[in-house]
Image (cartoon, rainbow, N blue to C red):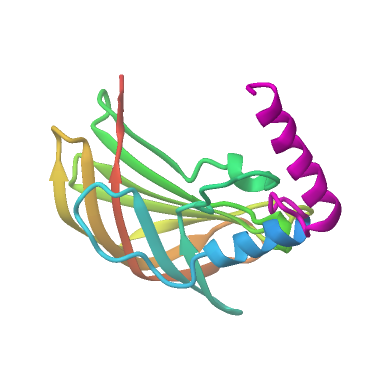
Amino acid sequence: MRTLIPLLLLAAILSCAASCEDPLGVSPEAVAERIRANTPTELPPITSEGLNTMGAYIHTDTGRVLFVASGVERPDPIGAASTDCDPFQNFKFVKDELISIQGRWCPRREIGDNRDMWLDVAFWNTDSITASFSYIPDLSSNNKIYTSLNENFSVTVLHHDEQRQSISAKFSGVLMHTESPLLETIRIESGRLDATYSLTP
């Protein structure tokens, strides 16, 4: 009887594979549909619970870009090449008293979205705040890095729990791409983060 059950299960799978449409949901079309369904369309809420969220609207010359550093959260990653993307790299550098919260918008190549974006907000002794934003529009382009001008970028720390190693904040302001030949600026609005971090020497 123990041998018969696996054989019946295998027969059912083979039968469905021959007659059913993509029983495991791993066809390119099924994977793309799951990614579209889980791609953020709005900012995460403002929270102070260490939920590992980050988001902002990035305003450029060509329009507004939604940035959400949460990867593509899918319970079933089968067949999706972009699921190995780590959406966060958050550390507290103890020696320098620096907390760096860096979130990533992961490329979604299965649906033709090849953008790769990073946003980093750094808290230096909580007295000085810097930010940077990296943007790669497609696979054939180099990244552009925009950095903050202190007088044009503001951060409000909502909560910092050193025991739980979590920090939350709101931020907004102007970042500049300073490489020649153009000095381009972008504007960040409605920025928010609520993240945990690891300690490093």
**What stretch of residues is rendered in magenta?**
1-27
- Can you tell which quarter of the image residue 184 is in? bottom right
The magenta stretch spans residue 20: yes
Height in image: 96 above or below 142?
Answer: above
- Residue 57 rendering spot, x and y as whole percentages: 43, 71
Residue at the image position 61 percent from the left and 66 percent from the top: 36
- Residue 21 rendering spot, x and y as whole percentages: 78, 59
**Residue 136 appears in view:** yes
Pick the residue in front: 180 or 125: 125
- Quadrant of the image containing the N terminus: top right
- Residue 183 rendering spot, x and y as whole percentages: 57, 66
Q: Residue furthest front?
A: 1
Height in image: 32 above or below 124?
Answer: below
- Residue 67 rendering spot, x and y as whole percentages: 48, 64
- Can you tell which quarter of the image residue 187 is in? bottom left
Residue at the image position 28 percent from the left and 35 percent from the top: 98
Q: Residue furthest top?
A: 201
The magenta stretch spans residue 26: yes
The number of callouts visible is: 0
Q: Does residue 200 appear left or right of residue 26 in this picture?
A: left
- Can you tell which quarter of the image residue 89 is in? top left
Pick the residue in front: 179 or 165: 165
Q: Does residue 132 appear left or right of residue 60 in this picture?
A: left
Height in image: 16 above or below 152?
Answer: above
**Residue 114 appears in view:** no
- Quadrant of the image containing the C terminus: top left
Q: Does residue 188 appear left or right of residue 80 in this picture?
A: left
Pick the residue in front: 141 or 178: 141
